[in-house]
Amino acid sequence: MCLATPAKIVGFNQDKILIEKDGATMEVSAFLLPKAKIGDWILYVNDLAIKKIDAEEAREILRLVESPRNKVKTELLSGKFKKIIEKAHQNDLNKGEIIYLLNSEGMEKDALLAEADITRRAFIKDFICIHGIIEFSNYCENDCAYCGLRSANGAIERYRMSIDEIKETAKQAAVEKGYKLLVLQSGEDNFYTDDMLVELIKQIKSVCRVFIFMSCGERGFECYKKMKNAGASGALLRFETSSQSLFTKIHPQGKNLENRIEHLRFLKELGYFITTGSLIGLPGQTIEDLADDILLIAPRAHMVSMGPFIPCDNTPMENCPAGDPEMNLKMIAVLRLLMPTARIPVTTALETLLGEDGRKRALAAGANALMMNLTPKKYRSLYKIYPGRFFDNDSLWQKYGLFKYEESYKMLEERMAKEIKRK
Ligand code: 5AD
């Protein structure tokens, strides 16, 4: 679940291992590695040495996760910018100040991203959490103008996974690979009755220890209550945009923003770990709208999910330009400053637009989690919310980001409970 950091052993102090970190020596507990010796490379999480790795792999991980740590010359930044950053740390930004940060370019943009990176490190250390997503059905009863799964799109092949298939996929992820948090996502598909979803959650929970986050749209209070009672921990539901008029425009049939926000309200009341966010770069969306998105997310969410809009063929928005990934990075950074301990995963849409370096850049802008696609291969390309979705084999990330230790499950449980309590 949490990506550990590689380090080289430089000495021992009784039962502790000494490692070098940023030029200084640091002590970590050695009880999992009784035979380690000076010069070995290890992975550690917090102050616990987890396992030995070879030097080559350690360097490769460092290359993947190291952020550029831009040198920002603070004396060249404007007084206004510095004042706004100071206020952001006190969770006290007004809309105008958020707009200022979202408009930042050049040196001030670099400084914003660097500040978010430092904030992430200060509050949550070098943790990068790895979560999995299983997209279990691409049927959808809605007709959202941006989404390739919209019901009016007759050009995609539809699939539904059976309860057994979803359970097996989840079990394999948790038991064999060490995933601790799985998002189960689908279009709004009422083929799966409340009882079926409840059964699914119960079955998964009975075969493996894993946190389940449901992402199946507006299913109403009763359904979410039953799913929570069955063992679901979190819910992922984006509000897509805080602009009333834009929301109505892109959701042609019967959807409204109040209802979506009402859903988020009662999900929180039910004790869910709330994941929400918006689409960045919708046609007609203004910087004011994006600032409002931030103001909507910050007080509500425990985890943020936002990504750039990507035009999808066979939708009414197929010819619209894609959202700006650089704006997405700035949005992540502002939210990290406002929500220092929140979970902010790098979304696949952002990775799709930024390419190779996307993960690294988003992590260096304050994100702290990755979402791996665990949908069985035969369905993966059919879950086409937008084209050209980024996938990689994630071999190295998964190899080093997933642990089956009891401690890492407990750690996640404690962190989520703390985050829920905080809001
Ligand atoms: N581009 C980017 N994200 C999209 N989503 C749907 N369609 C697109 C698109 N064309 C996102 C929505 C939804 C999530 C599951 O996928 O924000 O909430």
Image (tube, rainbow, N blue to C red):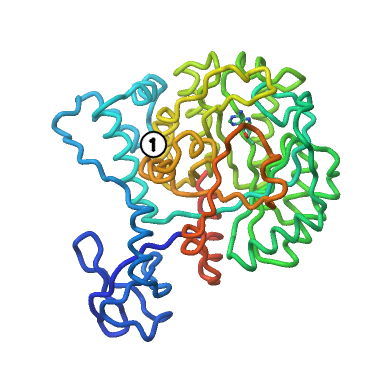
Look at the picture and state if 53 lies above or below 85. Answer: below
Judge the density around disc 1: few (<14), some (14-19), many (≥20) Cα neighbours within 10 Å: many
Look at the picture and state if 212 lies above or below 402. Answer: above
Horizontal side of 419 relative to 312 (left or right) equals left
Ligand 1: quadrant of the figure? top right
Residue 402 in picture, x, y percent from top left: 52, 63
Q: At 61% from the left edge and 33% from the top edge, which residue is drawn?
A: 238
Look at the picture and state if 222 lies above or below 206. Answer: above
In this rendering, the count of numbered labels is 1
Hey, which quadrant is residue 119 in on the image?
A: top left
Residue 310 in picture, x, y percent from top left: 56, 27
Horizontal side of 398 relative to 51 (left or right) equals right
Q: At 28% from the left edge and 45% from the top edge, which residue is drawn?
A: 68
Q: Nearer the viewer, residue 288 or 387?
A: 387
Hey, which quadrant is residue 387 in on the image?
A: top right
Which amino acid lies under the numbered mark 1 shown in the image of this protein? Ala
Residue 296 in picture, x, y percent from top left: 53, 29
Residue at numbered disc 1: 333
